[in-house]
Image (cartoon, grey):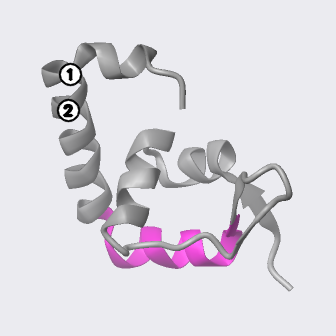
Amino acid sequence: MSQLIRIGEASRVLGVSPTTLRRMEEKNIITPIRYTEAGQRLYRYDDLIKLQQNSPQQSTDLSTDADQHVKNHPLDVFTAS
């Protein structure tokens, strides 16, 4: 069985921010394998590696989208979720 990792580590594996990883989830590019009791996303490491190998440009495009969102909505960064 593949190792399960949380969103922070998953974002480091892909080289994107956690916000970008959530955006990838919204666009059905990746889906957490499950959630912890506390609601934290868990991703399968092997799935992240496959995604990274299959679509490196897609991750870059989403990262740019996230950066643009922060520039256009700077107060969103300080909103508690």
Task: Give the amino acid type for the residue marked by disc 2 in the picture.
Answer: His
Give the image quarter of residue 74.
top left
* Horizontal and vertical percent position of residue 22: 45, 52
* Horizontal and vertical percent position of residue 59: 32, 57
How many numbered dots are placed on residues in this image?
2
Provide the residue span drawn in magenta: 43-56
| Residue situated in front as seen by the camera: 12 or 77 | 77
Asked if residue 44 is among those painted magenta in the image, a careful observer would answer yes
* Horizontal and vertical percent position of residue 71: 17, 20
User: On screen, 14 above or below 25?
Assistant: above
Q: How far separated are the C-alphas under marks 1 and 2?
A: 6 Å
- Are the residues tagged 1 and 2 within 8 Å (C-beta)? yes
**Residue 20 left/right relative to 8:** left
User: Residue beneath label 2, please?
Assistant: 69
Mark 2, Cα crowd under 10 Å, few <14 / some 14-19 / many 20+, is few
| Residue 59's disc number | none
The residue that appears at 49% across and 54% down in the rendered structure is 14
Task: Give the amino acid type for the residue marked by disc 1 in the picture.
Answer: His
| Residue 73's disc number | 1
Assign a secondary structure to mark 1. loop
